Image: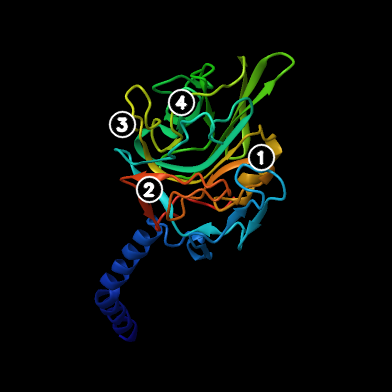
Amino acid sequence: MLTRKRAQSSLEYLGTYGWAIIIIAVILAAMYALGIFNSSVFVPRAQPNSCTIYRPNGTSSSYDINPVGPCTDTLPEYIFRSKGVGDYIYVPGSELASSPLNIVGNLTITAWVEPIGSPYHDVVDKEGQYGMKLDYNNGPHPCTPSGFQGFCLEWDSNGNWTGPGAGIPNTTFGKWMFIAVSIRYNATTGNSIKYWYGNGQLLREGNVVGEMTYNNTNFTIGAISKGSPSPGYGEAEWFNGSISNVQVYNASLPPSYISAMYEKGLGSPPIYLHNLVAWYPLNGNPNDYSGDKLNGLTNNVVFGSSWYNGYQIP
């Protein structure tokens, strides 16, 4: 009799609190899906303008360059969030031959990106001179290895894509990745070597004829170059997703540097100041913090703070 009463009491308890338990479980699952329990959520955030590079001898100087502020690997408060239709940042004056962004010969570009849907094209572009973009699932352009399932990094120098792009392992929509490209000119042979990197790994390299040279288009983040002859004004190949921490160097950084930048994570400040040309953390604004003052202008851009879902600290 006592056992039956205990059983009946247990059923009444479940009947009373069962729905509450189910509702709590659903809420916890939703919070997990939104990234609330991601370890990145609970780390301190770097505020806009918290770190900058000081050039005491003026812009474009490479002597005695120093970081100013708490220039650690702290994750940013904000990132550049693109909806994929007309959202981009461009740098006025970057189309001029005298601009520091008109880099010839040797170059490295790095960025953290999170694609969320189509289109998923231009991350950084100076059309006809240099640029890097992503395609997915072996299209619309070929990818190495053939039939690769994931994101493919493409990299333009002087309008030369050097055959297929490079597949980045373990990549998918809604997941942050670190991408980088570089080119090294050999004055002895008169030719160049291009490199593709994904999440700190050298994915492939390819030989190209000649040296990367100047083209009069704007440096643009998130779309084809503003001012390009066709179609121009950033009106195509928009990037749909998030972009953070774009760094540009007038040197071909070695693989060990690229790997170290990835290991430091999305909040890593520049690693090689001597050849740093531009640094766009995109932490709440389009400003350049390299000390070269190559500030960008925004077009329909949103800087979001809830960006950490899909990001795991390396």
Closest to the camera, between mark 3 and mark 1, is 1
Q: Which residue is mark 1?
A: 275
Horizontal side of residue 1 vs 211, given as left or right: left
Could you tell which of marks 2 and 3 lies nearer the N-terminus? 2
The x and y percentages for residue 234 are 34, 33
What is the C-alpha distance between the residues marked 4 and 1? 22 Å
| Callout 1: SS | helix
Q: Is residue 253 above or below residue 49?
A: above
| Amino acid type of the residue that numbered disc 3 sits on in the rendered structure | Glu
Q: Is residue 97 above or below residue 292?
A: above
**Contact (Cβ within 8 Å) of mark 4 with mark 2:** no
Q: Which residue is mark 4?
A: 216
**Contact (Cβ within 8 Å) of mark 4 with mark 1:** no
Closest to the camera, between mark 2 and mark 3, is 3
Residue lying at 39% horizontally and 45% vertically, measured from the top left: 297
Could you tell which of marks 3 and 4 lies nearer the N-terminus? 4
| Amino acid type of the residue that numbered disc 1 sits on in the rendered structure | Asn
Q: Is residue 37 above or below residue 260?
A: below
Could you tell which of marks 4 and 1 lies nearer the N-terminus? 4
Horizontal side of residue 22 vs 288, given as left or right: left
Q: Residues within 10 Å of mark 1 (few under 14, many from 20)?
A: some
Closest to the camera, between mark 4 and mark 1, is 4
The quadrant holding residue 183 is top right
The quadrant holding residue 18 is bottom left
What is the C-alpha distance between the residues marked 3 and 4? 17 Å
Q: Which residue is mark 2?
A: 81
Identify the residue at the far bottom of this view: 2
| Amino acid type of the residue that numbered disc 4 sits on in the rendered structure | Asn
Could you tell which of marks 3 and 1 lies nearer the N-terminus? 3
